[in-house]
Each structure stands twice: as structure tokens, then as C-alpha cells.
Image (tube, rainbow, N blue to C red):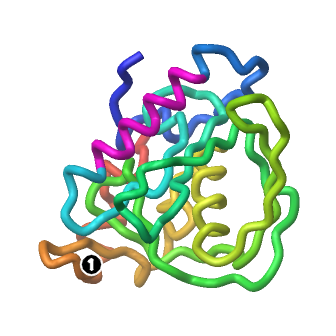
Amino acid sequence: MNKQLITLPSPDLRERSKKIGLISSDVADLISNMETVTLEWEDSRDHEVGVALAAVQIGVLQRAVVIRKDFNDKQNREFKVFINPEITKYEGEIVYDYEGCLSVKDIYGHVPRYSKVRVKAIDEHGKEVRTTAEGFLARVFQHEIDHTNGIVFVDRIHDDEEAFFVLDDDGKLSALDYETEIKNNEQLWQTE
């Protein structure tokens, strides 16, 4: 399996992924491929970190997510695996912060998310995992679990004219003009 990263406007990104029933060697290969794709993407960027990836982002409609073990240390290239992840409880307050996505080229968003979530999943060995995530990790879980449900972060801010940004060559975010660069952008919004 040597899958490549897919980006909008790929229709797969708006499809719901299926639950994984059996943790097989195919799932192990999928996880390994997801980690490799994430790190290759990161290695091709000057100012970004490959934080996480859902299987749908490499065109595999299965509920698998990999999340970086340490967001603050680019040298730590290890991931945690979450199969069939689901949020069991949303907590805290709604917080707006910036998000990017490996499958959304060059666009960032100012996205509302809960500050705390409880998540259950199984790991790559079939063992149940339950975790409470706060802050940035809570945001990452919501973003990736959205992917498994066919939701891309831009869908959460579709009509917010102030929410879209681009990363410049110096690693700074600059606002995008909603009317000219976002509203009718066929790369972002599937047009029938």
C-alpha cells in the first residue's frame, strides 16, 4: 500500500468512513502509510508540523486516525493510533483558534471547537483506549474525527467571512478576501 495524500476538491474527503472490524495486517500497513505520508508532508514544509491524519486523507474510507505523540518536538516522529475514534462527551467552552489541514492546500481557518472532549477508540492492538483531551489536543481530535464523518474544517466556517487565512513565506498568517478567494472557490466547495 503506497497511498498518496488527497486534497480538496476530492469527493472522498466529504464521505463518511466505515468502522474497522478486524485489526489485521492491512490495518497495520494503513497506519504505517498514514504516518509516512504525514511526515513526508511535514518534511516538505518550512513552517508547519504534520500533527495528525485520518485514513480518508489518503483515500481510504476507514475510521483510523494517527496523532503525533509530541506536537512541540519535531524530532519526535512517533504517533498514537486511534481506530474507530468517537467523541463521547464535549466539555468546556467553545474556543476559536487557527487550524490547517494537510488536505486543504494553503488555507487556514479560525475554527470554533470545544476546549475539552472525551474520546474512546481502540489502538493498533485492539485494546480499548479512553482519553480526555484538552486544549490543542481536543482540537486535533475534533478535526480528525470530523474527517471520519466526511467533514473538513472549512465546512465549520463556510459562511464566516473573517475566518480564512493563508500562510506566507515567513510563516505568518494573512487574511484572505472572502468574496474573491473563498466564497466561490471550486477547490473548497463541491459544486454540483
Splitting the image into 4 quarters, where does residue 87 fall?
bottom right
Q: Residue 123 vs residue 169: left or right?
A: right
Q: Magenta segment, which residues? A: 28-41
Is residue 61 a member of the stretch shown in magenta? no
Q: Would you identify the image quadrant in which residue 140 lies?
A: bottom right
In the rendered view, tell whether residue 24 sits above or below residue 84: above
Is residue 8 visible in the rendered image? The answer is no
Q: Is residue 188 visible?
A: yes
Residue 113: percent from left, percent from top = 65, 73
Q: Is residue 35 magenta?
A: yes
Q: Residue at x 42, y 50 (%)?
A: 77
Q: Would you identify the image quadrant in which residue 28 lies?
A: top right
Nearer to the camera, 85 or 74: 74
Q: Position of residue 80 (x, y in %)?
A: 60, 47
In the figure, is residue 33 to the left or right of 16? left
Residue placed at 68% from the left, 32% from the top?
124
On the image, numbered disc 1 is attached to which residue? 177
Q: Position of residue 117 (x, y in %)?
A: 77, 67
Quadrant location of the C terminus in the rendered image: top left
Quadrant in which the N terminus is drawn: top left
**Residue farthest toward the front in the current orientation of the protein:** 75
- Residue at position x 59%, y 52% in the image: 144
Look at the picture and state if 18 lies above or below 38.
above
Helix, strand or loop at label 1? It is loop
What type is the residue that disc 1 sits on? Asp
Q: What's the magenta bit mostly, secondary-structure-wise?
A: helix
Relative to 33, 146 lies left or right: right
Q: Nearer the viewer, residue 118 or 19?
A: 118
- Vertical comparison of 162 with 9: above or below: below
